[in-house]
Image (cartoon, grey):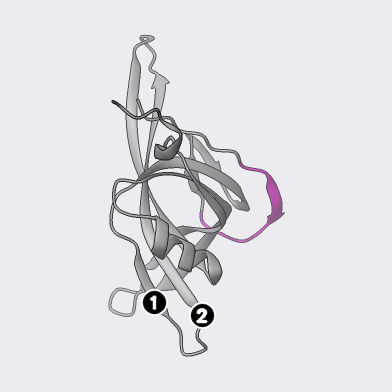
Amino acid sequence: MNRFHINVTERGLRNQAPFSVLGGSMQTEGRVVLTGEVSDTPEIRVTLDGVYTASFSLKTTARRPNRAGVYVSGEKRHNIIARGDLALDVRNNVRKGTRLSVEGEFNLKQWEEKSSGETKYFTRVLIDRFTSAEPDQLALPMAA
């Protein structure tokens, strides 16, 4: 069973588009803790300044009761960004299918599309730290 944990604390109001978090609307930047499964292989890039950047998607599952009292599962994909030494740790330790718990802050990228003039939004989580949500394989007893 996949577990979903999200913890948001307000940091300051910004003029941003609403972001849906567990049925609510979030217009502030905040801290978030997500636990889920990496849904694609992390992409590692290096800037001209020599700073490493890792980006990947994290798939989380939320279970909530509907009006009839039956639990319904819903999956979401979150775009995760790691920079610096943390990106190197992602490169060495994270693969597709790895269960992770990440902590960071929401970041909203907003732009206007030139062809239609429509405003587009892209939400991502800039992480400060991550831990493996899988049991340590070395700590498990070995079969004889």
Q: Which residue is mark 1?
A: 45
Q: Which residue is mark 2?
A: 51
Q: Quadrant of the N terminus?
A: top left
Mark 1 lies on a secondary structure that is strand
Mark 1 crowdedness (10 Å alpha carbons): few <14, some 14-19, many ≥20: some
Q: Which residues are magenta?
A: 8-17
Give residue 15's quadrant in the image: bottom right
Q: Nearer the viewer, residue 130 or 68?
A: 130
User: Disc 1 to disc 2, how far (Cα)?
Assistant: 8 Å
Residue 30: % across, % down? 63, 51
| Residue at horizontal 59 percent and vertical 51 percent from the top | 27
Left or right of 11? Residue 26 is left
Q: Is the stretch drawn in magenta largely helix, strand or loop?
A: loop
Furthest toward the bottom, the residue is 48
Q: Nearer the viewer, residue 115 or 99?
A: 99
In the rendered structure, which amino acid carries the disc numbered 1?
Arg
Left or right of 52? Residue 99 is left
In the rendered structure, which amino acid carries the disc numbered 2?
Val
Q: How many marks?
A: 2
